[in-house]
Image (spheres, helix red, strand yellow):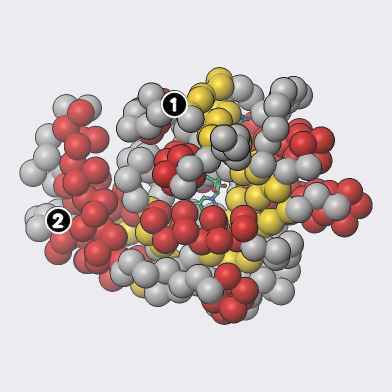
Amino acid sequence: MTEKKHILVAGGAGFIGSHLCEYFLGQGYRVTCLDNLITGREENLASFKNHPDFSFVLKDVISPIEWEGDIYAVLNLASLASPKEYYKYPIETLKVGSIGTLNLLELAKAKKARYLLTSTSEVYGDPQVHPQREDYWGNVNPIGPRSCYDESKRFSESLTIFFHRVHGVQTRIARIFNTYGSRMRLDDGRALPAFLTQALTGKEVTVFGDGSQTRSFCFVGDMVEGLAKLLFSEETTPINLGNPDEITLLQFAEMVLKMTQSKSRIVFQSLPEDDPRLRKPDITKAGRVLGWHPKVALELGLQQTIPYFLSQLEQCGTKIV
Ligand SMILES: NC(=O)c1ccc[n+]([C@@H]2O[C@H](COP(=O)([O-])OP(=O)(O)OC[C@H]3O[C@@H](n4cnc5c(N)ncnc54)[C@H](O)[C@@H]3O)[C@@H](O)[C@H]2O)c1
């Protein structure tokens, strides 16, 4: 009997990482999740933690990683990932994007493994080009409040491409745009979980600015499929993964109110510093190179996500209206 191939998912106890662990177990791989649980949660692993091919290792990837045995692929999702979290942990964010990325690349090099970095649309900063294509270099304030995240990912991308160019590591770089679905944290401060939580609990729905800034939201099932296709492709330069259907935040707030049948009121608050005005991926390259297009429309994805929000709110005893 041939050994199952082994995939290591750093940051696997987080939102997207836990879906990736589950996906690769379903595809017949052995999966190890490495996570220090700074924002990840063991409950994200609950539905597969007893799978015979799954293991969890509590580990901070900032410290050196020694590993016995084969690894087929290293997926690097370890990062602080939402503004609320990286404002709280800016140094940790910079360390995981630099030292953590380096440690995981060294591991991939030693094991002759594939390596996939989950970078972000934030590398484009406050974009002056719309929609954003991979050949746009971005507009980032290097000392702005978001720079701990944006620059950590830009550095991660650079380190990753040079491990490919200098050491021949089979690296892949995904630039992920806003993603949503079950296992996301309700209080991570981003618009989608904030609006859903406010609407379901009858609180005012807070829209920053006049709500004309745009976002585009990708369902997690589509994202996992895109990341898997990228991992198995031969593409070493960055690829945008996200849903290009753009919606203003005000339209989105109205959609959430309708879908949750909420009586909450929309209120407007001042725009935070460095809040991106426009966000929309150009996914032509993902279509051409990977044959990938997101399939789940926002309304359908929200229908699948609302029950998860309800169960999380019930679990913490929050009154749902
Ligand atoms: N969710 C999105 O919309 C989105 C958008 C763009 C990019 N991304 C990127 O995708 C990846 C996953 O995002 P997510 O939304 O699932 O975030 P998440 O916070 O749910 O997951 C990140 C995981 O990394 C872990 N982690 C952080 N620092 C670590 C360290 N030093 N050592 C070990 N583990 C560590 C956290 O505990 C957490 O489980 C991140 O790299 C993020 O930057 C996500």
Q: Nearer the viewer, mark 2 or mark 1?
A: 1
Closer to the chain start, of discs 2 and 1, is 1
Q: Would you say the beta carbon of the disc 2 residue lies within 8 angstroms of ligand 1?
A: no
Q: In the rendered image, which residue does mark 2 sit on? A: 260
Q: In the rendered image, which quarter contains the C terminus?
A: top left
Q: Position of residue 140 (x, y in %)?
A: 69, 60
Q: Is residue 283 left or right of residue 244?
A: right
Q: Is residue 91 left or right of residue 277?
A: right
**Identity of the residue drawn at 78% across and 42% down:** 112
**Identity of the residue drawn at 62% across and 58% down:** 232
Check disc 2: other Cα within 10 Å, few if <14, some if 14-19, many if 20+: some
Q: Is residue 129 visible?
A: yes
Q: Is residue 199 left or right of residue 9?
A: left
> Nearest the camera: 175 or 289?
289
> Nearest the camera: 212 or 111?
111
**Identity of the residue drawn at 25% across and 66% down:** 299
Q: In the rendered image, which residue does mark 1 sit on? A: 52
Residue placed furthest toward the right: 166
Quarter of the rendering containing residue 19: top left
Quarter of the rendering containing residue 5: top right
Check disc 1: other Cα within 10 Å, few if <14, some if 14-19, many if 20+: few
Q: Is residue 210 visible?
A: no
Do the residues bearing badges 2 and 1 touch, measured as CB atoms within 8 Å? no
Specify the amino acid type for callout 2: Thr
Q: Position of residue 159 (x, y in %)?
A: 80, 49
